[in-house]
Image (cartoon, rainbow, N blue to C red):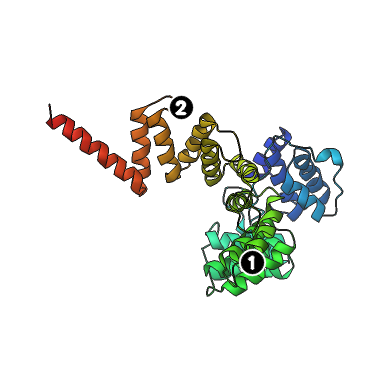
Amino acid sequence: MAKEPELVARNRRLAEAGDPIAQFNLGNMYRIGYQVKADRDLAVKWLSAAAAQGGTVAQAMLRQMGVDIPVEAVPEGGDVPPPEVVADPLCFDQPADDPAALQAAARTGSADAQLALGDAYRKGVGVTADPQEALRWYRLAADQGLAQGQCAVAMMYELGLGVGQDVAEAKAWYTKAARQGDPQAQFNLGNMIRQGRGGAPNPEVAAKWFRKAADQGDPAALFALGTLCETGSGVPRDAEQAVEYYRAAAEQGDAEAQFNLANMLREGRGTPADPAEAAALYRRAAEQGLATAQFNFALMLATGRGVPRNEAAATAWLRRAADQGHADASHLLAEAESRSRSERSGR
């Protein structure tokens, strides 16, 4: 019996142990025939296992396959995070070890394989990086109606990769994908509309697209809706609703949402003041490299608000923020150094 490819074997071991992301990966491989023989029954089996643990991407994929999902397979508030929504359904965080098989599947007309091959050419994974070739494969997938392929084409036009930058063309492709329910396209389209790229700014319409993506759990869209609610742009100003959106995005690890939620908790806007939770959120965002969070966490440490006072740790976080160009952090460090020199010279 032929040895199973390592990628398949690894995901199978984890899937059989109950890991929902591995179940999704394995089901998706059987769905499109990537490194395994395509098998609809096995695809449904493993995608259903992931869906039963709250995997929203698996649920959406099963619906696209025409599979009815039992109510019990979509639990309320499941505590298992769904797989990350990405443009490439074959994003397994490692290079494809059989690009020839992927190319063969793409040439037979598999839209999913065409999408994955486009991504391989864009990233230079298993093949020589070639943005024009990436766009060609993305376009083939998009022309078959694959929403993720349409979103990928839109991003290539938006960024000018493999083609001249064309905001209008990008917006048109995002719109096609967004109307099919692709959350990344919905968010990107909302962003273009809010910023007035490809037309006049329209925060009300932007909010509608953000909400569609947020309803699918997209953290960037949740954060964007939080900012609209906090500022009253395109939607009624509502600090409590902003807190809810920020918290939903922050729980998925969005650093900017963690920072904004910390600000509201520190100030008691839209929620009772809670300096301890604010400090914890500042730290989570700071550890992800957000300079403004590093600065604010340093201030909390310096004043002992929400955390025990720790001047040495405060200085260390100020330095990390300053190293990223945060002007106020650099100013405070310079003042501290000046005071230190004065104290030394006065002895």
- Determine whether the residue tagged by mark 2 lies in a helix, strand or loop: loop
Q: Nearer the viewer, residue 110 or 158?
A: 158
List the residue tagged with mark 2: 307
User: How far from the left and from the top, in percent, is residue 299?
Assistant: 40, 35
Quadrant of the image containing the N terminus = top right
List the residue tagged with mark 1: 138
- Note whether residue 211 is visible: yes
Quadrant of the image containing the C terminus = top left
Q: Nearer the viewer, mark 2 or mark 1?
A: 2
Image side of residue 73 versus residue 77, left or right: right
Q: Residues within 10 Å of mark 1 (few under 14, many from 20)?
A: many
- Note whether residue 97 is visible: no
User: How far from the left and from the top, in percent, is residue 249?
Assistant: 61, 44
Position of 279 relative to 33 (above/below): above
Position of 153 relative to 72 (above/below): below
Task: Identify residue type, mark 1.
Answer: Tyr
For marks 2 and 1 on the same chain, the one whose residue lies earlier in the sequence: 1
Q: Nearer the viewer, residue 321 or 162?
A: 321
Q: Residues within 10 Å of mark 2 (few under 14, many from 20)?
A: some
Residue at 58%, 59% (x, y): give it: 120
Total marks in image: 2
Q: Nearer the viewer, residue 35 or 133?
A: 133
Mark 2 and mark 1: Cα distance apart in space:
50 Å
When asked about the image quadrant of residue 114, the answer is: bottom right
User: How far from the left and from the top, in percent, is residue 82?
Assistant: 69, 42
Q: Nearer the viewer, residue 258 or 201?
A: 201
When asked about the image quadrant of residue 290, the answer is: top left
Position of 79 relative to 213 (above/below): above
